[in-house]
Image (cartoon, rainbow, N blue to C red):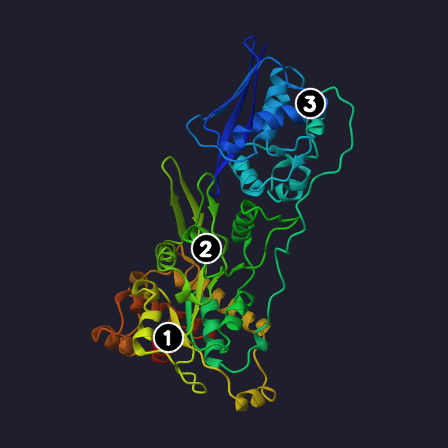
Amino acid sequence: MGVARTHAVALIGLTGALVEVEADISSQLPNFILIGLPDAALAQAAQRVRAAAQNSGCPVTPHRLTVNLSPAALPKHGAGFDLAIALACLAADRVVSTASVGRVVHFGELALDGRLRPTPGILPGVIAAARLGHTTVMVPAGNAEEAALVPGVRVIGVASLRDAVIWHGGELTPRPVEPIRYAAAESADAAELDLVDVIGNDDAILALQIAAAGGHHVFMLGPPGAGKTMLAARLPGLLPDLDQAASLEVSALRSLSGRGLGSALITRPPLEAPHHTATAAAIVGGGSSQIRPGAAARASQGVLFLDEAPEFARPVLDALRQPLESGVISIHRANVIAHFPARFQLVMAANPCPCGQYGAGDLECTCPPSARRRYLARLSGPLMDRMDIQLAVSRITAAQLRLAGETPRTSSTDARARVITARAAAAERLAQTPWRVNAQVPGPWLRAAPARLDLAATASIDRALERGGLTMRGYDRVLRVAWSIADLDGTVRPGPNEVGLALYLRKGMA
């Protein structure tokens, strides 16, 4: 009879906590007891471990087995602890080396035949293990490439429990098996759409470039067929490649969502476009047992696009107000709090009325004024106040269509080059601050020296503030957009023209 221990990682949001998996064999009545706040999936590990070990040629002892997951007060979720539990049990029975098992952090779910299934959250789990001082991890073969993306960590990929036992000193003959891998998924860096496809709507194209340069939120209002969805889908193509930290964050969120990564980190900003029937949990994240990231978290460092925004439930939209300000989503449960990053650009599109034809010019709107007011009132004032750019988009005419064939149009490659230059200028100006894009800069900093603009430049927004046309939050957001316009144009400081254009982009629908 003996005791052995190894390690695993419990994920709470993107944060990992080290879990010590202890196994004790005693001479009492045969049983397999798992303690330490396991959820339903983890509590069933006893059956998976017994069957997998039996079919791998190294059956678990018939004596009483007690497995403790410590710290006992920390909730543990999912089947990713199976490999650690199985090896701790076999080490307690002296089938494998106790010292070898104790030095390695184990991840993986067991199939009944002993093979290891790819497990969601391997990348953030390995990052947590490395942060906590562990340098060797054992993962399913289907996750080995993903785990190897973390520098400074030795990754041991095994296809089965039998392979893991042999690696830890078990006296078994190798038996080749076919590794279980993730089902083929869409490419992490999907092909991006080009801005050159957009015809007309020059104001909207310019607004997209300004939004990309400063990381600003955008609201577009216009009838069906005006190109709102087309414009929003092209915004990620204007954004620069992700830096190392952002790439690791986006890749970790993808891993936690259960989508495979392959052998490379994600380098392009993501785009999430949930349907308007999505719940608050689907947008911001949640879950009854294991807390998963929602669309807003998966869009971090990229774009969250809400098409037909008034059709979303109002509580769902209002749930985004706090993440838009803080850049973090915090999901509270009775015994745990999970945090997810939420540095996304929000793009919302809406029709002007339920029938969509108000102001279109070619068809008559059949909605009474009260219906139009109720429709747009589904977007709350506080949420709209957080939208830096609010723009009306109109359908193109036949004359614009003919002219488009004769006029060169801006491509995403050219626009992205301008955006990269603008962001570099902003980063240089903000080098001694914790911010890197204009949308992150707080109002007090913009209104204080040396960033404070002279009275001639701010005259238009000063008047709007005095007359109640702008809130104080709106005033600061106009200043941020003005700085982005100046960066895009290569101007050192915004002047009256830049501030006036920023005010138009915010109040252009009024």
Which mark lies nearer to you, 3 or 1?
3
Up/down of 350 relative to 409, above or below: above
Which amino acid type is marked by label 1? Ala
Q: Where is residue 5? Give x, y as percent.
A: 56, 21
Q: Where is residue 369? Give x, y as percent.
A: 31, 78
Which mark lies nearer to you, 2 or 3?
3
Q: Residue tagged by mark 1?
A: 502
Which mark lies nearer to you, 1 or 2?
2
Q: Quadrant of residue 501?
A: bottom left
Q: Residue tagged by mark 2?
A: 296
Q: Residue tagged by mark 3?
A: 54
Which amino acid type is marked by label 2? Ala
Kindly tell me whether residue 381 is visible in this rendering: yes
Up/down of 46 relative to 464, above or below: above
Name the one closer to the observer, 446 or 282.
282
Question: Disc 2 and disc 3: Cα gap in Å?
Answer: 44 Å
Which quarter of the figure is the N terminus placed in?
top right
Which amino acid type is marked by label 3? Gln
Q: Where is residue 339? Give x, y as percent.
A: 42, 45
Mark nearer the N terminus (3 vs 1): 3
Mark nearer the N terminus (1 vs 2): 2
Name the one closer to the observer, 353 or 96.
353
For the residues labelled 3 and 1, say whether their Cβ atoms are less than 8 Å apart. no
306 with respect to 139 (left or right): left
Q: Where is residue 180? Give x, y as percent.
A: 69, 40
59 with respect to 398 (left or right): right
On residue 453, which mark appears? Answer: none
Q: Circle 1: is it few (<14), some (14-19), or many (20+) Cα within 10 Å?
A: many
